[in-house]
Image (cartoon, rainbow, N blue to C red):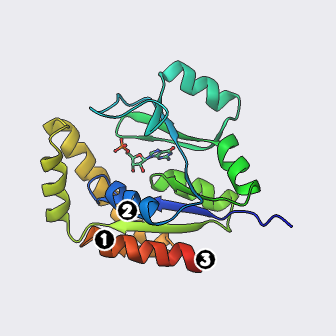
Amino acid sequence: MNKKGKLFIVSGPSGSGKSTVLGEVFKRRDRLYFSVSATTRAPRPGERDGVEYYFIDERRFDEMVEHDEFLEHARYAKCSYGTPRKPVEEKLNAGIDVILDIEVQGAGQVKSRMPEAVSVFIAPPSLEELERRLRSRGTESEERIALRLETAKTELREAGKYDYVVVNDDYLRAAGELLQILNNA
Ligand code: 5GP
């Protein structure tokens, strides 16, 4: 009979290189669904609505919360983020593995509701390297970088709650490690 897909939670501070690692994982593995979140954050250059995120306003976000349309949701760096529940459930029921790229509060919510989910924390090699990466992105203001760095420090303290920690010293190596975790789950 149809086997259910597995749910993977991937967290990592802004600047951990998580998106690059995930991009590589999706290149190397098919039948894997990336859950597209809804956010009230403004799109960065090149980001497309419905691809990286669904870009919505606070009012629509609150409406979705009220209608219980989110599997989890959280505030992060003064914006709201949430995982639309329906597509995740549909893919899992169709036997397709799902990846949630979400921050630590949301990860905790999912883990307590679906303890079978496998959680992975992508860590930067060091805080210095994290700061360097945040700055080199060049899309964020000083104030936002400082806020993200502070948040990252708090997040790093949560790494121990995850099933696995992958250190992103080299994104190809880290992607290989993450793939192994997916394949062995
Ligand atoms: P960014 O604004 O850099 O794209 O994302 C900021 C943080 O929000 C990242 O840690 C990302 O994983 C997290 N995030 C993205 N989508 C969601 C979501 O649906 N729920 C939660 N809880 N966090 C999310």
Extreme-top residue of the structure: 59
> What secondary structure is marked by label 3?
loop
In the rendered view, tell whether residue 23 sits above or below residue 169: above
Circle 2/circle 1 CB separation < 8 Å: yes
Quadrant showing the N terminus: bottom right
Closer to the chain start, of discs 3 and 2, is 2
Q: Which residue is mark 3?
A: 185
Which of the two discs, 3 and 1, sits closer to the camera? Answer: 1
What x and y, as percent, mark residue 180?
A: 48, 78
What x and y, as percent, mark residue 17?
A: 29, 59
> What secondary structure is marked by label 2?
helix
**66 to the left or right of 179:** right
* Residue drawn at x 61%, y 56% as measured from the top left: 110
Quadrant showing the C terminus: bottom right
Q: Residues within 10 Å of mark 2 (few under 14, many from 20)?
A: some
Q: Which residue is mark 2?
A: 24
